[in-house]
Amino acid sequence: MIIDRRTLLIGTAGGVAGLTIIPAFGQVPPLKKKDHYKVGFAQTESNNPWRLAQTASMKDEAAKRGAQLVYTDAASSAAKQVADVNSMIAQGVDFIFLPPREEKPLIPAVMNAKKAGIPVLLVDRNVDPSLAKPGVDFLAFIGSNFVLEGQRVADWTIEKTGGKGKIIELEGSVGASPANDRKKGFDDTIKAKAPDMVILASQSGDFARDKGRQVAETLLQAHPDATIVYAHNDEMALGAIAAIEAAGKVPGKDILVVSIDGEKDGVQAIVDGKLGCSCECNPRFGPAAFDILYKYANGDTIPPMIINPDRFFDASNAKEVLPTAF
Ligand code: GYE
Protein backbone atom coordinates (compact mmCIF):
# COMPACT_ATOMS: atom_id res chain seq x y z
CA MET A 1 0.00 0.00 0.00
CA ILE A 2 1.52 3.33 -1.03
CA ILE A 3 0.65 6.35 1.01
CA ASP A 4 1.81 9.56 -0.58
CA ARG A 5 1.63 13.12 0.68
CA ARG A 6 -1.91 13.54 -0.55
CA THR A 7 -3.48 10.62 1.24
CA LEU A 8 -4.19 10.07 4.86
CA LEU A 9 -4.75 7.00 6.97
CA ILE A 10 -7.92 7.16 8.97
CA GLY A 11 -8.36 4.70 11.82
CA THR A 12 -11.86 3.34 12.17
CA ALA A 13 -13.59 1.51 15.00
CA GLY A 14 -12.39 -1.67 13.35
CA GLY A 15 -8.77 -0.90 14.29
CA VAL A 16 -5.91 -1.58 11.90
CA ALA A 17 -7.92 -4.01 9.83
CA GLY A 18 -10.43 -1.25 9.23
CA LEU A 19 -7.92 1.30 7.95
CA THR A 20 -9.30 3.22 4.99
CA ILE A 21 -7.50 5.57 2.65
CA ILE A 22 -9.31 8.76 1.79
CA PRO A 23 -7.93 11.99 0.37
CA ALA A 24 -6.57 14.05 3.24
CA PHE A 25 -8.93 16.74 4.39
CA GLY A 26 -8.41 19.98 2.58
CA GLN A 27 -6.21 18.61 -0.14
CA VAL A 28 -6.52 18.84 -3.88
CA PRO A 29 -6.79 15.38 -5.50
CA PRO A 30 -3.46 14.09 -6.84
CA LEU A 31 -2.65 13.71 -10.54
CA LYS A 32 -0.73 10.68 -11.82
CA LYS A 33 2.16 11.18 -14.21
CA LYS A 34 1.07 10.21 -17.71
CA ASP A 35 2.33 10.93 -21.21
CA HIS A 36 -1.13 11.78 -22.48
CA TYR A 37 -4.02 13.08 -20.43
CA LYS A 38 -7.77 13.18 -20.95
CA VAL A 39 -8.75 16.70 -19.92
CA GLY A 40 -11.98 18.67 -19.76
CA PHE A 41 -12.45 22.31 -20.73
CA ALA A 42 -15.91 23.63 -19.80
CA GLN A 43 -16.31 26.92 -21.70
CA THR A 44 -18.94 29.43 -20.54
CA GLU A 45 -20.20 30.62 -23.95
CA SER A 46 -18.82 31.44 -27.38
CA ASN A 47 -20.47 34.75 -28.17
CA ASN A 48 -17.42 36.97 -28.20
CA PRO A 49 -13.87 37.08 -29.59
CA TRP A 50 -12.33 36.79 -26.13
CA ARG A 51 -13.93 33.40 -25.48
CA LEU A 52 -13.21 32.20 -29.02
CA ALA A 53 -9.53 33.14 -28.61
CA GLN A 54 -9.38 31.34 -25.27
CA THR A 55 -10.99 28.19 -26.69
CA ALA A 56 -8.60 28.21 -29.65
CA SER A 57 -5.62 28.58 -27.31
CA MET A 58 -6.79 25.65 -25.12
CA LYS A 59 -7.56 23.43 -28.14
CA ASP A 60 -4.22 24.19 -29.83
CA GLU A 61 -2.30 23.42 -26.67
CA ALA A 62 -4.23 20.19 -26.02
CA ALA A 63 -3.36 19.06 -29.55
CA LYS A 64 0.32 19.99 -29.07
CA ARG A 65 0.52 17.98 -25.84
CA GLY A 66 -1.33 14.99 -27.30
CA ALA A 67 -4.14 15.42 -24.79
CA GLN A 68 -7.64 14.14 -25.44
CA LEU A 69 -9.89 17.18 -24.90
CA VAL A 70 -13.49 16.94 -23.73
CA TYR A 71 -14.85 20.35 -24.71
CA THR A 72 -18.23 21.76 -23.71
CA ASP A 73 -19.96 25.13 -24.21
CA ALA A 74 -22.43 26.17 -21.51
CA ALA A 75 -24.19 28.68 -23.81
CA SER A 76 -24.28 31.37 -21.09
CA SER A 77 -25.94 29.10 -18.52
CA ALA A 78 -24.26 28.46 -15.17
CA ALA A 79 -26.62 25.49 -14.64
CA LYS A 80 -25.50 23.94 -17.93
CA GLN A 81 -21.88 24.55 -17.02
CA VAL A 82 -22.37 22.58 -13.77
CA ALA A 83 -24.00 19.75 -15.78
CA ASP A 84 -21.09 19.89 -18.27
CA VAL A 85 -18.56 19.44 -15.48
CA ASN A 86 -20.60 16.56 -14.03
CA SER A 87 -20.58 14.89 -17.44
CA MET A 88 -16.77 15.29 -17.64
CA ILE A 89 -16.49 13.64 -14.23
CA ALA A 90 -18.68 10.74 -15.49
CA GLN A 91 -16.42 10.43 -18.54
CA GLY A 92 -13.42 9.95 -16.27
CA VAL A 93 -11.26 12.91 -17.27
CA ASP A 94 -7.92 13.25 -15.46
CA PHE A 95 -8.06 17.02 -15.02
CA ILE A 96 -10.56 19.86 -15.55
CA PHE A 97 -9.92 23.41 -16.79
CA LEU A 98 -12.85 25.53 -15.64
CA PRO A 99 -13.74 29.20 -16.23
CA PRO A 100 -16.62 29.44 -13.72
CA ARG A 101 -19.24 31.64 -15.39
CA GLU A 102 -20.42 32.97 -12.04
CA GLU A 103 -18.72 32.99 -8.64
CA LYS A 104 -21.30 31.08 -6.58
CA PRO A 105 -23.33 28.77 -8.87
CA LEU A 106 -20.20 26.87 -9.98
CA ILE A 107 -19.17 25.88 -6.44
CA PRO A 108 -21.00 22.50 -6.68
CA ALA A 109 -19.07 21.68 -9.88
CA VAL A 110 -15.75 22.39 -8.14
CA MET A 111 -16.75 20.30 -5.12
CA ASN A 112 -18.09 17.39 -7.23
CA ALA A 113 -14.79 17.16 -9.11
CA LYS A 114 -12.86 17.23 -5.84
CA LYS A 115 -15.05 14.44 -4.45
CA ALA A 116 -14.47 12.42 -7.61
CA GLY A 117 -10.69 12.82 -7.19
CA ILE A 118 -10.21 15.12 -10.21
CA PRO A 119 -8.06 18.25 -9.81
CA VAL A 120 -9.58 21.46 -11.18
CA LEU A 121 -7.66 24.49 -12.44
CA LEU A 122 -9.79 27.63 -12.60
CA VAL A 123 -8.95 29.52 -15.76
CA ASP A 124 -9.77 33.22 -16.27
CA ARG A 125 -12.66 33.50 -13.79
CA ASN A 126 -12.67 32.80 -10.08
CA VAL A 127 -15.18 31.39 -7.59
CA ASP A 128 -16.30 33.00 -4.34
CA PRO A 129 -13.20 32.63 -2.13
CA SER A 130 -15.30 32.17 1.00
CA LEU A 131 -16.89 29.03 -0.48
CA ALA A 132 -14.00 27.26 -2.20
CA LYS A 133 -10.26 27.74 -1.83
CA PRO A 134 -7.25 27.32 -4.11
CA GLY A 135 -4.85 24.64 -2.90
CA VAL A 136 -7.73 23.09 -0.95
CA ASP A 137 -10.83 22.65 -3.08
CA PHE A 138 -9.25 23.35 -6.45
CA LEU A 139 -5.66 23.48 -7.60
CA ALA A 140 -5.24 27.19 -8.40
CA PHE A 141 -6.56 30.18 -10.36
CA ILE A 142 -4.84 31.48 -13.48
CA GLY A 143 -6.03 34.72 -15.05
CA SER A 144 -5.85 38.49 -14.89
CA ASN A 145 -6.00 40.79 -11.89
CA PHE A 146 -9.45 42.23 -12.60
CA VAL A 147 -9.38 44.77 -9.77
CA LEU A 148 -6.16 46.17 -11.21
CA GLU A 149 -7.71 46.30 -14.70
CA GLY A 150 -10.55 48.47 -13.35
CA GLN A 151 -8.07 50.67 -11.47
CA ARG A 152 -5.93 51.20 -14.56
CA VAL A 153 -8.92 52.25 -16.67
CA ALA A 154 -10.08 54.62 -13.92
CA ASP A 155 -6.59 56.16 -13.61
CA TRP A 156 -6.38 56.68 -17.39
CA THR A 157 -9.89 58.23 -17.45
CA ILE A 158 -9.12 60.60 -14.56
CA GLU A 159 -5.90 61.69 -16.24
CA LYS A 160 -7.58 62.16 -19.62
CA THR A 161 -10.52 64.22 -18.30
CA GLY A 162 -8.77 66.10 -15.52
CA GLY A 163 -10.98 64.24 -13.03
CA LYS A 164 -14.27 65.59 -14.38
CA GLY A 165 -17.19 63.73 -15.87
CA LYS A 166 -20.44 61.87 -15.47
CA ILE A 167 -20.13 58.15 -15.94
CA ILE A 168 -22.37 55.35 -17.16
CA GLU A 169 -21.00 51.92 -16.25
CA LEU A 170 -21.80 48.76 -18.22
CA GLU A 171 -21.12 45.76 -16.00
CA GLY A 172 -20.25 42.24 -17.11
CA SER A 173 -22.31 39.14 -16.36
CA VAL A 174 -24.02 39.33 -12.95
CA GLY A 175 -22.09 37.32 -10.38
CA ALA A 176 -18.99 36.80 -12.60
CA SER A 177 -15.67 37.51 -10.89
CA PRO A 178 -14.37 39.87 -13.63
CA ALA A 179 -17.61 41.90 -13.38
CA ASN A 180 -17.42 42.15 -9.58
CA ASP A 181 -13.72 43.01 -9.54
CA ARG A 182 -13.65 45.38 -12.50
CA LYS A 183 -16.46 47.31 -10.84
CA LYS A 184 -14.65 47.42 -7.52
CA GLY A 185 -11.31 48.48 -9.03
CA PHE A 186 -12.86 51.26 -11.10
CA ASP A 187 -15.49 52.57 -8.66
CA ASP A 188 -13.12 52.65 -5.66
CA THR A 189 -10.47 54.52 -7.66
CA ILE A 190 -12.94 57.14 -8.89
CA LYS A 191 -14.25 57.59 -5.36
CA ALA A 192 -10.76 57.92 -3.88
CA LYS A 193 -9.09 60.07 -6.53
CA ALA A 194 -11.77 62.04 -8.39
CA PRO A 195 -14.30 63.75 -6.08
CA ASP A 196 -15.70 65.71 -9.05
CA MET A 197 -16.66 62.58 -10.97
CA VAL A 198 -19.95 60.77 -10.50
CA ILE A 199 -21.19 57.35 -11.58
CA LEU A 200 -24.73 58.09 -12.74
CA ALA A 201 -25.81 54.50 -13.36
CA SER A 202 -24.30 51.01 -13.42
CA GLN A 203 -26.04 48.06 -15.05
CA SER A 204 -25.15 44.67 -16.51
CA GLY A 205 -24.81 44.19 -20.26
CA ASP A 206 -23.76 40.53 -19.72
CA PHE A 207 -20.37 41.04 -21.46
CA ALA A 208 -22.27 40.93 -24.80
CA ARG A 209 -22.23 43.47 -27.64
CA ASP A 210 -25.93 43.73 -28.37
CA LYS A 211 -26.96 43.62 -24.71
CA GLY A 212 -24.41 46.38 -24.11
CA ARG A 213 -25.94 48.42 -26.94
CA GLN A 214 -29.47 48.02 -25.56
CA VAL A 215 -28.49 48.89 -21.98
CA ALA A 216 -26.41 51.86 -23.16
CA GLU A 217 -29.34 53.12 -25.23
CA THR A 218 -31.66 53.06 -22.19
CA LEU A 219 -29.10 54.61 -19.83
CA LEU A 220 -28.11 57.35 -22.30
CA GLN A 221 -31.77 58.31 -22.64
CA ALA A 222 -32.20 58.39 -18.86
CA HIS A 223 -28.95 60.36 -18.40
CA PRO A 224 -28.46 62.73 -21.35
CA ASP A 225 -25.78 64.55 -19.34
CA ALA A 226 -23.42 61.52 -19.35
CA THR A 227 -19.93 62.25 -20.68
CA ILE A 228 -18.18 58.91 -20.10
CA VAL A 229 -19.09 55.25 -20.65
CA TYR A 230 -17.00 52.65 -18.80
CA ALA A 231 -17.67 49.13 -20.11
CA HIS A 232 -16.31 45.98 -18.44
CA ASN A 233 -15.34 44.60 -21.86
CA ASP A 234 -14.77 45.76 -25.42
CA GLU A 235 -17.85 44.01 -26.80
CA MET A 236 -20.15 46.12 -24.58
CA ALA A 237 -18.06 49.21 -25.35
CA LEU A 238 -18.64 48.60 -29.07
CA GLY A 239 -22.36 48.22 -28.35
CA ALA A 240 -22.28 51.52 -26.45
CA ILE A 241 -20.47 53.24 -29.34
CA ALA A 242 -23.31 52.12 -31.66
CA ALA A 243 -25.88 53.45 -29.16
CA ILE A 244 -24.06 56.80 -28.85
CA GLU A 245 -23.97 57.17 -32.64
CA ALA A 246 -27.64 56.20 -32.92
CA ALA A 247 -28.41 58.98 -30.41
CA GLY A 248 -26.72 61.48 -32.75
CA LYS A 249 -23.63 61.95 -30.57
CA VAL A 250 -19.98 61.43 -31.40
CA PRO A 251 -18.09 58.75 -29.44
CA GLY A 252 -14.65 60.04 -28.48
CA LYS A 253 -15.86 63.66 -28.63
CA ASP A 254 -19.22 64.05 -26.89
CA ILE A 255 -18.80 60.89 -24.87
CA LEU A 256 -15.53 59.20 -23.91
CA VAL A 257 -15.74 55.38 -24.00
CA VAL A 258 -13.24 53.26 -22.05
CA SER A 259 -13.04 49.49 -21.58
CA ILE A 260 -11.12 46.25 -21.09
CA ASP A 261 -9.97 43.23 -23.19
CA GLY A 262 -8.02 44.61 -26.17
CA GLU A 263 -9.85 42.56 -28.81
CA LYS A 264 -9.22 43.42 -32.48
CA ASP A 265 -12.45 45.41 -32.99
CA GLY A 266 -11.74 47.30 -29.75
CA VAL A 267 -8.19 48.20 -30.77
CA GLN A 268 -9.51 49.23 -34.21
CA ALA A 269 -12.04 51.50 -32.44
CA ILE A 270 -9.11 53.15 -30.60
CA VAL A 271 -7.36 53.71 -33.95
CA ASP A 272 -10.62 55.21 -35.26
CA GLY A 273 -10.85 57.57 -32.27
CA LYS A 274 -14.11 56.07 -30.97
CA LEU A 275 -12.70 54.18 -27.99
CA GLY A 276 -10.37 55.98 -25.59
CA CYS A 277 -8.51 53.04 -24.08
CA SER A 278 -8.70 49.33 -23.39
CA CYS A 279 -6.80 47.53 -20.66
CA GLU A 280 -5.64 44.24 -22.10
CA CYS A 281 -7.03 41.00 -20.69
CA ASN A 282 -5.06 38.21 -22.32
CA PRO A 283 -7.17 35.16 -23.32
CA ARG A 284 -4.34 33.10 -24.79
CA PHE A 285 -3.13 31.11 -21.85
CA GLY A 286 -3.52 27.52 -23.03
CA PRO A 287 0.28 26.97 -22.83
CA ALA A 288 0.49 28.32 -19.26
CA ALA A 289 -2.57 26.29 -18.17
CA PHE A 290 -1.11 23.02 -19.52
CA ASP A 291 2.28 23.84 -17.95
CA ILE A 292 0.53 23.94 -14.57
CA LEU A 293 -1.05 20.52 -15.17
CA TYR A 294 2.36 18.94 -15.95
CA LYS A 295 4.08 20.69 -13.04
CA TYR A 296 1.41 19.47 -10.66
CA ALA A 297 1.73 15.87 -11.89
CA ASN A 298 5.48 16.26 -11.37
CA GLY A 299 4.95 17.12 -7.70
CA ASP A 300 5.91 20.82 -8.00
CA THR A 301 4.24 23.31 -5.67
CA ILE A 302 1.61 25.32 -7.53
CA PRO A 303 1.00 28.90 -6.31
CA PRO A 304 -2.70 29.49 -5.54
CA MET A 305 -3.01 32.57 -7.82
CA ILE A 306 -1.13 32.81 -11.10
CA ILE A 307 -1.63 36.27 -12.59
CA ASN A 308 -1.26 36.99 -16.30
CA PRO A 309 0.49 40.26 -17.10
CA ASP A 310 -1.73 42.64 -19.11
CA ARG A 311 -0.69 45.51 -21.38
CA PHE A 312 -2.63 48.76 -21.84
CA PHE A 313 -3.83 50.13 -25.17
CA ASP A 314 -4.67 53.70 -26.19
CA ALA A 315 -3.97 56.00 -29.12
CA SER A 316 -0.24 55.87 -28.36
CA ASN A 317 0.14 52.18 -29.30
CA ALA A 318 -3.15 50.90 -30.83
CA LYS A 319 -1.91 50.89 -34.45
CA GLU A 320 1.17 48.93 -33.54
CA VAL A 321 -0.67 46.18 -31.60
CA LEU A 322 -3.61 45.85 -34.01
CA PRO A 323 -2.07 43.10 -36.20
CA THR A 324 -1.59 40.78 -33.22
CA ALA A 325 -4.87 41.52 -31.41
CA PHE A 326 -7.39 38.63 -31.12
O1 GYE B 1 -13.20 40.08 -20.35
C1 GYE B 1 -14.95 38.96 -21.43
C2 GYE B 1 -15.40 37.57 -21.41
O2 GYE B 1 -13.74 36.17 -18.05
C3 GYE B 1 -11.94 37.63 -18.28
O3 GYE B 1 -15.13 37.17 -20.09
C4 GYE B 1 -13.09 37.01 -18.94
C5 GYE B 1 -14.10 37.96 -19.56
C6 GYE B 1 -13.65 38.83 -20.70
O4 GYE B 1 -16.69 37.31 -21.79
O5 GYE B 1 -14.84 39.57 -22.67
Image (cartoon, grey):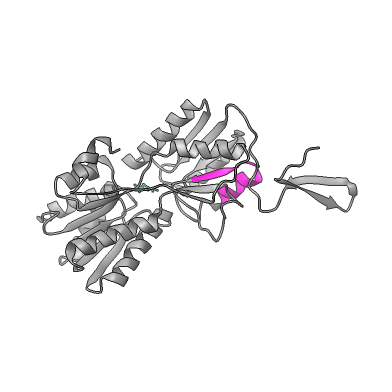
Does residue 179 appear in the picture of this structure? no
Confirm whether the magenta stretch covers residue 285: no
Q: Residue at x 71, y 45 (%)?
A: 5
Q: Residue furthest bottom?
A: 195
Instruction: Decide which of 161, 241 is in the foreground and name it.
Output: 161
Q: Residue at x 28, y 45 (%)?
A: 262
- Residue 271 location, x and y as percent? 16, 44
Number of marks in the image? 0
What residue range appears in magenta? 108-122
In the rendered image, the vertical position of residue 273 relative to residue 223, given as above or below: above
Confirm whether the magenta stretch covers residue 114: yes
Position of the N terminus, as image quadrant, is top right
Is residue 58 found left or right of 317 in the rendered image?
Answer: right
Instruction: Decide which of 282, 96 is in the foreground and name it.
Output: 282
- Residue 15 location, x and y as percent? 90, 50
Question: For residue 119, what is the image quadrant?
Answer: top right
- Residue 151 location, x and y as percent? 33, 60
In the rendered image, the vertical position of residue 80 relative to residue 173, given as above or below: above
Position of the C terminus, as image quadrant, is top left
Q: Residue at x 19, y 61 (%)?
A: 160
- Residue 145 location, x and y as percent? 41, 54
Question: For residue 188, what is the image quadrant?
Answer: bottom left
Does residue 287 appear in the picture of this structure? yes
